[in-house]
Image (tube, rainbow, N blue to C red):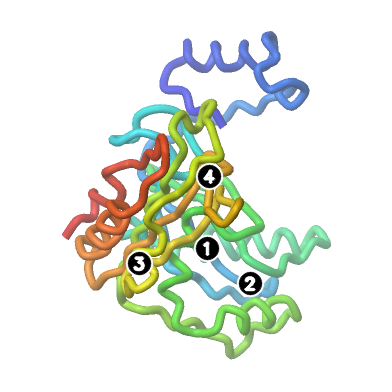
Amino acid sequence: AIVCDTLAAARAAARAMLADGAFGAAGGEIVIEERLRGEEASLLAVTDGAAVVPFPPAQDYKRVGDGDAGPNTGGMGAYAPAPVISPERYQDALARIVRPTLAALAAHGRPYRGCLYAGVMQTERGLQVIEFNARFGDPESQVVLPLLESDLLELLCAAAVGDLSGCTARWASRKAVCVVLASGGYPGEYQTGYPIEGLASLRDCEDVILFHAGTARREGRVVTTGGRVLNVVGLGETFAAAIRAAYSAIDDIYFEGMYCRSDIARRVWE
């Protein structure tokens, strides 16, 4: 998606796709939508087609640069639970967005079982839907799942067989912050194959979880293979503690051209 702040930018984006072939055949048809303004959040839930087990709301950072500058990416970080979605707003989202969507799918002969991911934005007109995905979010899952104290497999299996009755999820009261380490140049052109140093130092960090993304093991070393390379997740009783844990761990990691945003979750610093 190309998010445009002006009519001129929108026209330029449309021209690039339709006339200049910016995305090849995939850009031959475009969808133009209203430019929404507000604070985004990601709502994940597991459903058997009727019953819904909601996960804590998360908020991700799509722009590559600090202060939400630069182009969109696959996600440069996230945190959970996101305060922008209060318990009352979450219940409203379930009642007005999630459950009607499931009912409509069933009515069209497409009952949905599995993980439903709703991307929403809190606007002046209330919650507005940006997108739906039939999967967990990335990097939202990296901050939501570490807070789950009950069995994820049990939830998924119950959803798969169409019976979530009696299933609940237990959540830790902690906070989670994910910072993505990216290759220099991402989301544009970037180089790969660089050795990653410092990973062994994180093995005994109780409040840090490392998720690999664009990596591979070659000749006994872990090297970069993609734009988004690693997800460093810090956990803490407060967002401040989780932020410190994540960025302290990042100080021990290095690869050529490594880049990350320095402001992940700063808006909820306690």
Numbered disc in front, either 3 or 2: 3
> Could you tell me which residue is drawn at 35 percent across and 67 percent down?
208
Alpha carbon separation for disc pair 4 and 1: 29 Å
* Mark sitting earlier along the chain (2/4): 2
Amino acid of disc 2: Thr
Q: Position of residue 177 (x, y in %)?
A: 34, 59
Q: Which mark is residue 44?
A: 1
Q: Position of residue 51 (x, y in %)?
A: 62, 77
Q: Can residue 61 be seen at all in this image of the molecule?
A: yes
Q: In the rendered image, which quarter contains the N terminus?
A: top right
Amino acid of disc 3: Val
Q: Are marks 2 and 4 in contact (CB under 8 Å)?
A: no
Q: Residues within 10 Å of mark 2 (few under 14, many from 20)?
A: many
Q: Which residue is mark 4?
A: 224
Front-lying residue, 179 or 210? 210
Q: Position of residue 109 (x, y in %)?
A: 83, 62
Q: In the rendered image, which quarter contains the C terminus?
A: bottom left
Q: Which mark is residue 47?
A: 2
* Mark sitting earlier along the chain (3/1): 1
Q: Residue furthest right?
A: 109
Numbered disc in front, either 4 or 1: 4
Q: Which residue is mark 3?
A: 208
Q: Are marks 4 and 1 in contact (CB under 8 Å)?
A: no
Amino acid of disc 1: Leu
Mark 2 lies on a secondary structure that is strand
